Image (spheres, grey):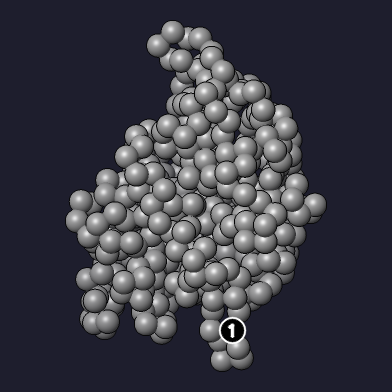
Amino acid sequence: MNPFALARVRTVLLDLVTQGVLPGAVALVQHRGRTVLHEAVGLQRPANPAQPGLAVPAMAPDTVFRIYSMTKPIASLVALMLMEEGRLLLAHPVSRYLPAFKGQQVYDAATGTLAPAAREATVHDLLRHTAGLSYAWDTGPIADQYRNARVGSRRHSNQQLAAALAPLPLLHPPGTCWEYSRATDVLGAIIEVIEGAPLGQVLQRRVFEPLGMQDTGFSVPASSRHRLAEPFARHPLTGAGVTLIDVAEPPVFESAGGGLVSTAADYARFLQLMLGRGTVHTPTGSVRLASSATVDFMTADHLGTLPRAGTILPAGYGFGLGVAVRLATGGATRPGSAGHYSWSGMGGTFFFVDPAQDLFAILLTQAPGQLEMLCELFPTLVYAAL
């Protein structure tokens, strides 16, 4: 990769820090098995006006970030590992593992009425976000019911979340429309049922320990809290208040859809596994968590011509099992090879993997209001270095 173009990644991110758009950021790029960029810019957390004399640590390569929905690919891979063992079938209805999901009804917005779903949502629907669920970020009667049921409350366990969500109407008949949703959280509850253990323990045993992801989990231990990145108290452009999840203590809700913290180096180990199609080669040996066929299956498009609700899935992309999948080299507003896959986290984090270029890249910051811009900017800068 061109070293001058790679240096531009740091320069542009530093400009965003200087302009007050980002408090700080960490970027990591690996190409052909070699880390060619691992840079930290800015501050780990903004200065506190109430404590003007208090020193603020600089952003560091090992800073810990809330990665929100970058949790989804990890949980999705664990579900597929259970599939490989014959303990989970994607064609099975969700109700096979969580009986409360049997007999769901679909809301008809035109008439305001409910009708039985033509078929049950499957585990496959959860993985590709076609289960008819929602995140309830909008307004309307279904979103109101989500809020009234406190779906997504940090005080709910995964099983309690599933119990609160199951009786609520679906926005779409299962299998008919892609809508970003609580589906991966429900998947987390299924993983717990199959494994008979809390999700955090399952992820630790199946992924974090084998890959050496020592700083990844659902909370930050006291010994590492000094490395936790924080956002601006207010959005630098709109002035709106910014609040991120509290990760100082182990949460009741171990969200498979958005609860993990991690570092650039830790998440790079997971992406090395993905780019290696289920296997990571290290100086001391190989770690294999899944077959190459399973990773190929996970990172292929599973939507085809199904409609997409909302604007979260960019133009030019389909969706696999936990990741967005680039359909062609063209057709999008950012560079990328056909078959490249990616996802982001609402706190301001993003990654992509490009098997055709033997490349992956990670950008971590805590700036929720800048996510859309960063998802366009970062891959543009990285591909410019090829």
For mark 1, give the secondary structure.
Answer: strand
Residue to which mark 1 is pinned = 286
Q: Is residue 141 above or below residue 294?
A: above
Instruction: Tell me the residue at 54%/14% (across/down).
Output: 115
Question: Would you say 132 lies left or right of 190 here?
Answer: left
Question: Would you say 342 lies left or right of 51 here?
Answer: left
Pointer 1 local density, CA inside 10 Å: few below 14, some 14–19, many at least 20: few
Question: Would you say 170 lies left or right of 14 here?
Answer: right
Question: Would you say 106 lies left or right of 12 here?
Answer: right
Q: Is residue 142 above or below residue 87?
A: above
Give the percent coordinates (x, y) of residue 9.
Answer: 30, 71
Q: Residue furthest right?
A: 196
**Closest to the observer, 258 or 187:** 187
Q: Is residue 61 above or below residue 201?
A: below
State which quadrant residue 382 falls in: bottom left
Observer able to see residue 365: no
Q: Residue furthest left?
A: 330
Q: Amino acid at mark 1?
A: Ser
Instruction: Tell me the residue at 45%/63% (across/down).
Output: 296
**Closest to the observer, 147 or 317:** 317
Q: How many marks?
A: 1
Q: Quarter holding the N terminus? A: bottom left
Observer able to see residue 8: yes
Give the percent coordinates (x, y) of residue 53.
Answer: 55, 63
**Closest to the observer, 290 or 8:** 290
Give the percent coordinates (x, y) of residue 333.
Answer: 22, 52
Instruction: Tell me the residue at 64%/23% (across/down).
Output: 103
